[in-house]
Amino acid sequence: MTEPTPPPTGSSPDTEGRSGPEGDGGTRSAADWRRRIADLMPQVRADLEDLVRIPSVSLDSFDAAHVEASAQRVAELFRDAGADVEVVHIGEGHPAIIGGVDGPKGAPTVLLYAHHDVQPPGPDSDWQSPPFEPVERDGRLYGRGAADDKAGVMAHVAALRAHDGRPPVSVRLFVEGEEEVGSESLPAILERYADRLDCDAIVIADSANWAIGTPSLTTSLRGNVRVVVRVRSLDHGLHSGLFGGPVPDGITAMCRLLATLHTDEGDVAVEGLTWEPDPDVDYPEDVLRADSGVLDGVRLLGTGPLAARLWSRPSITVIGLDAPAVDVAANLLSPTCQAKLSMRIAASEDPMRAYAALKTHLESHAPWGVQVEVDLVDAGAGFTASTEGPVVEAAQSALADAWGSDPTEIGLGASIPFISQFAETFPSAAILVTGVEDPDTRAHGPDESLHLAEWEKACLAETLLLERLGTMRSDG
Ligand SMILES: [Zn+2]
């Protein structure tokens, strides 16, 4: 529970209460809001720590009771912040929080999205401190979910608190409980609650900022196409001494086939895939090496700017291979071999067209005439956000004022399939993908952490954004 908070220090008595141009003539300055957020942060952080203590891992093999508990806690936090919310369950899915606050008549409606479930922590021994006991070291709060995405949940709570539960826009809230396991119930939730989620703008607080001190809007995400490819050369396994030489085996054939997927330089060699124009951002090689832990002497793959290789061009990775394990391998020519591939595709690429290109490549590059079979596992589209319009401009100015530096537009090499589902369901809504993470966050990994000073700016930016969107009245 939180105490009602005082208005920003420094605001004169006649500017208390509702802000905005049509109030009593007083508008809070960015500096007023900064002080307001600074006053609120100790409680916001304490509430974040409470959330991190709930191990809301949504993977099937973990106790779903924790995800339920975190849903209830998140609902309570939003209720205390002035919103009317409920915890909803769809089928076997994990609970989501849905609700909102009505703003002034004619004000735009903004949907705030985050997720309260987290990735499994992995072994405790990989962590410097236990994953579900939040602890601060060097200005960062460590814990599973401290950033991804409970910091996003609390940024929404903070923005509502800053506006005393009476934001100048209508707010819709949607906090999902199964983002980390593929958002299976999302289509059903969007269908059933479409009228309660319908909006003019969507804020998805689940991405990263470019660097400490540089706020960002994530404007493109790659899609993902996964396939299983099978190679067959024999109708049964053969003695490798009696037949090795002229008779091809499945594993060697697979290795040759997989090797055709890249040029010698490491660019994807599949023809017909989309390569989008290079992004404006420069991603320095030493930063990527530090971020990724590539070993000394190991070369990076591909040609052209690193940001392009990560965000706007396809990549293909072998993510699984079925072959006899080394310690039980017999002297045998394996008749078959199968591999699973993950192909990331440019944001504007059609996933089924990309799948067809990959399938054609694999079938037409069969070494030694071996049989090749390709099956689609799944295909998700990428996403390109509009980078202009009044909502985007409001977000850019809110970020710039919160950080004191201009925001960059960045891409994300990974895919967030639910974003395209939002875009399909609410085609006229502007989608803003904002960040609470930074390059050191290590979301999904051991020692996940949140940069507390950057997070405070993210909370401030969202508060300013609601205020600025509130000035876009449509009732005239
Ligand atoms: Zn997330």
Image (cartoon, rainbow, N blue to C red):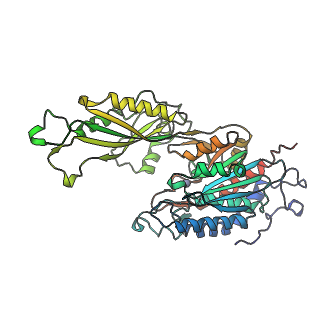
Front residue of 71 and 259:
71
Whereabouts is ligand 1, in terms of quadrant?
Answer: bottom right
Left/right placement of residue 4 relative to residue 217 reads right
Q: Is residue 151 above or below residue 343?
A: below
**Measured along the vertical axis of the image, is residue 40 above or below residue 316?**
below
Q: Nearer the viewer, residue 57 or 290?
A: 57
Residue 100: which quarter of the image? bottom right
The answer, for residue 269, to whether it is visible in the render is no
Q: Residue drawn at (42%, 63%), measured in percent from left and top?
A: 122
Report x, y in % for residue 392: 69, 42
| Percent x, y of residue 42 | 66, 69
Judging depth in this view, the residue of 266 and 420 nearest the camera is 420
Provide residue 178's location: percent of width, then percent of height. 54, 56
Q: Residue at x 45, y 58 (%)?
A: 445
Image position, residue 207 (x, y; %): 57, 50
Name the outermost residue toward the front. 91
- Compared across the picture, whether 105 is left or right of 141 comes to right
Figure check: 291 above or below 7:
above
Image quadrant where one finds the N terminus: bottom right
- In-image side of 434 versus 295 (left or right): right
Residue at 70% over, 56% down: 460
204 sits left or right of 25 in the view:
left
Q: Quadrant of residue 411?
A: top right
Residue 101 to residue 371: above or below: below
Placement of the C terminus among the 4 image quadrants: top right
Q: Does residue 67 show up?
A: yes
What count of labels does the image hold?
0
